[in-house]
Amino acid sequence: MNITHFKNTPEYALPATSTVALPLGEPVAMSASHGVERNDGVEAGIWECSPGRWRRQIVQQEFCHIISGSCTFTPDGGEAIEIRAGDALVFPANTTGIWDIRETVRKTYLLIG
């Protein structure tokens, strides 16, 4: 059994930031993450993103818990969801839409592929 333990996730040091893959307008959001991918198709990690808007294109199902920050997520064809620190979400596989980060967001996540 291999247990992955991310200690002190609010303060966990992440690597250098990079531009999000599909930014929409200014400011361009910058993100950083540290994840561990297992051999069973599951990835877990910590992710952080600065303010900005961008398109989500993850194909895997995702569970995430928001540690800090605030934003909205508007799924394609759906209503905007207000998200704040302490919230948890489950995205079905192939959920696409627009992230609008107002205050830097940090989350833990689990991708199930």
Image: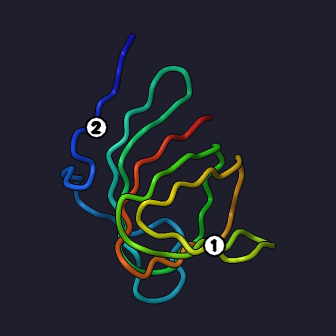
Relative vertical location of residue 93 with respect to residue 77 in this rendering, above or below: above
Residue to which mark 1 is pinned? 81
| Left or right: 68 in relation to 37 | left
Residue to which mark 2 is pinned? 6
Instruction: Give the quarter of the image for residue 77.
Output: bottom right
Residue 34 coordinates in the image, percent (x, y): 32, 45
As shown in the figure, which amino acid type bears the numbered disc 2? Phe
Q: Residue furthest bottom?
A: 26
**On the rendered image, what quadrant is the C terminus found in?**
top right
Q: How many marks?
A: 2
User: In front: 58, or 104?
Assistant: 104
The reply to whether callout 2 and callout 1 are in contact (CB within 8 Å) is no
Q: Kindly state the secondary structure of the residue where label 2 is placed.
A: loop
User: Mark 2 or mark 1: which comes first in sequence?
Assistant: 2
Residue 62 coordinates in the image, percent (x, y): 58, 46
Colour convention:
rainbow
